[in-house]
Image (cartoon, rainbow, N blue to C red):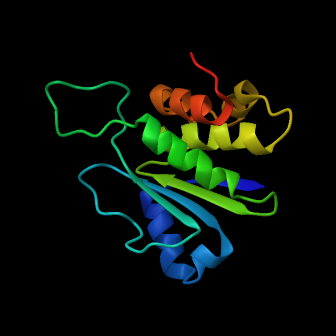
Amino acid sequence: MQIQALSRIEMIDLKERELDLLDKAKVISICCSEDINVFDIEHPNLLSLRFDDIEKFVPSHPHLVIFNEEMAEMTVQFLRKCQPKDLLLVNCHAGVSRSGAFISVAMEMFIEGIDAEHFFRVNYRIVPNVLVMRLLRQAAFGVTY
């Protein structure tokens, strides 16, 4: 499986160039609670999520949306429908934190013997959101931290 993280701008650009993108790839599109989704349609190859890049509730910003177990379960169900030949594209605002957590767990699910530590050393710009990674791993592997 090919897996790639994209920023919001990169995904918008790719979507405009590849009109049949959702027929060619599986896409997890993440936007902040106040942003407009990159994709405004429903499609079996698309999972759109809306949450902010935070790791705990921020009382001074109660409008922010935090990633939760329900979103993690939806994501794992979506990923389990993927095939080894699929291209998986994951986008968030910068393609670094939330996308990094999703990609890390997807790689653990699909690439036997993957070393997450090696992945982050090679992809040093990716700094995964710890909460997102923890909840995704819990949903995918039943691991609690």
Q: Nearer the viewer, residue 50 or 93?
A: 50
Q: Is residue 71 left or right of residue 78?
A: left
Instruction: Report whether residue 10 is seen.
Output: yes
Give me the residue at 44% from left, 41% from top.
70
Q: Is residue 124 left or right of residue 7?
A: right
Give percent across and percent down for residue 25. Answer: 65, 68
Q: Residue furthest top?
A: 145
Give percent across and percent down for residue 128. Answer: 53, 32
Residue 83: name its quadrant: bottom right
Give percent across and percent down for residue 47. Answer: 50, 59
| The C terminus, quarter of image | top right
Instruction: Report whether residue 96 is seen.
Output: no
Q: Residue furthest bottom?
A: 19
Residue 71: name its quadrant: top left
Give percent across and percent down for residue 18. Answer: 57, 80
**Above or below, 34 relative to 71:** below
Residue 126: name its quadrant: top right
Q: Is residue 84 left or right of residue 133?
A: right
Give me the residue at 69% from left, 51% from top.
80
**Above or below, 139 relative to 93:** above
Give me the residue at 41% from left, 53% from top.
49
Q: Residue furthest left?
A: 60
| The N terminus, quarter of image | bottom right
Q: How many marks?
A: 0
Give me the residue at 59% from left, 28% from top.
138
